[in-house]
Amino acid sequence: MDFDKTSVVVVAFSAICNAVAPVAEGTQSLMIGTTTSMPGLVEGRHRVIRLFPNADTLVGPIVLYAADKFSRVAVIFAEDEYGKTIFKAFRDKFEIGGRRIVFSDSFQPTDTEFRSIVAKMLDAKPDAIYLPGYGPGYIALINQIRERSTKIPILADSPLTNPPVYKAAGNAVEGVVVPATALDAGLPETPEQKAFLERYRRSLRESEYQCDNHV
């Protein structure tokens, strides 16, 4: 910003966004935060916006799915701002009506050995496992869970939907449940937002019509 006089800066990952946002707020540039679900990033700020679902949006579909099926869930989350935020949001929403998190721990996204933590987790006898995280360690963690238990349900995170990630995980990801979020997770408020959303929906309808006619 100081030397190149940039007007827009794109910043990725929660820990980095958390550090850069206060600095960006005191400049004349705009910070766009992405791959960050942490709460409070944009609230009260005028030079910072988020282009990524927040923690409640990501956790909501997983809680809705899990609440009807499981009463005892174990959680292993990435040891950073992202993982901690997702874990807290899940815990606050899931632990209602007798449902409990029976085991929780964190992992380093760069580590690759988790057999000890997996053994402790399975000793807690959870009905399912929720894994908010990313990185090489994420792939290793899923594979090492499947080494010990091929049947226990696994609820995973949106990074697993990236083709290089789930392909690297191989057969271990078969049957794993991941969240999906709507494009318009928030309600459009300005005329420009409403017009954009209507154009987007209209283009979807036209595409579906063309596909049906082609078939």
Image (spheres, rainbow, N blue to C red):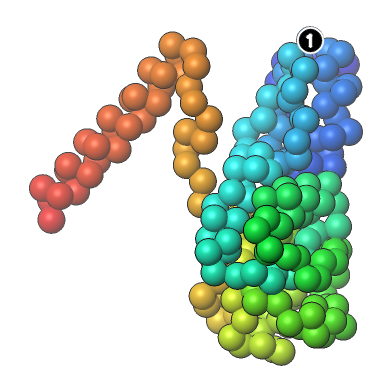
Q: Name the residue located 51 percent from the left edge and 52 percent from the top edge.
A: 180
Compared across the picture, whether 141 is left or right of 56 comes to right
The amino acid sitting under disc 1 is Gln
Tell me: residue 143, above or below residue 190.
Answer: below
**Place of residue 97 in the rendered image (x, y in percent of width and height, measured from the top left):** 65, 58
**Place of residue 178 in the rendered image (x, y in percent of width and height, measured from the top left):** 56, 61
Compared across the picture, whether 115 is left or right of 34 comes to right
For the C terminus, give its image quadrant: bottom left
Between 137 and 179, the residue placed more toward the observer is 179
Tell me: residue 71, above or below residue 10.
Answer: below
Q: Name the residue located 85 percent from the left edge and 29 percent from the top edge.
A: 20
Q: Secondary structure at mark 1?
A: loop
Q: Quadrant of residue 132?
A: bottom right
Q: Counting other residues with Cα less than 10 Å from the Cα at mark 1, is it few (<14), some (14-19), or many (20 or more)? A: some
Number of numbered discs visible in the structure rendering:
1
Q: Name the residue located 79 percent from the left edge and 80 percent from the top edge.
A: 124
**Place of residue 53 in the rendered image (x, y in percent of width and height, measured from the top left):** 61, 40
Q: Which residue position holds label 1? A: 28
For the N terminus, give its image quadrant: top right
**Place of residue 173 in the rendered image (x, y in percent of width and height, measured from the top left):** 57, 75
- The answer to whether residue 89 of the structure is visible from this angle is yes
Q: Quadrant of residue 5?
A: top right
Q: Name the residue located 59 percent from the left edge and 76 percent from the top edge.
A: 153
- The answer to whether residue 165 of the structure is visible from this angle is no
Compared across the picture, whether 72 is left or right of 16 comes to left
Between 168 and 186, the residue placed more toward the observer is 186
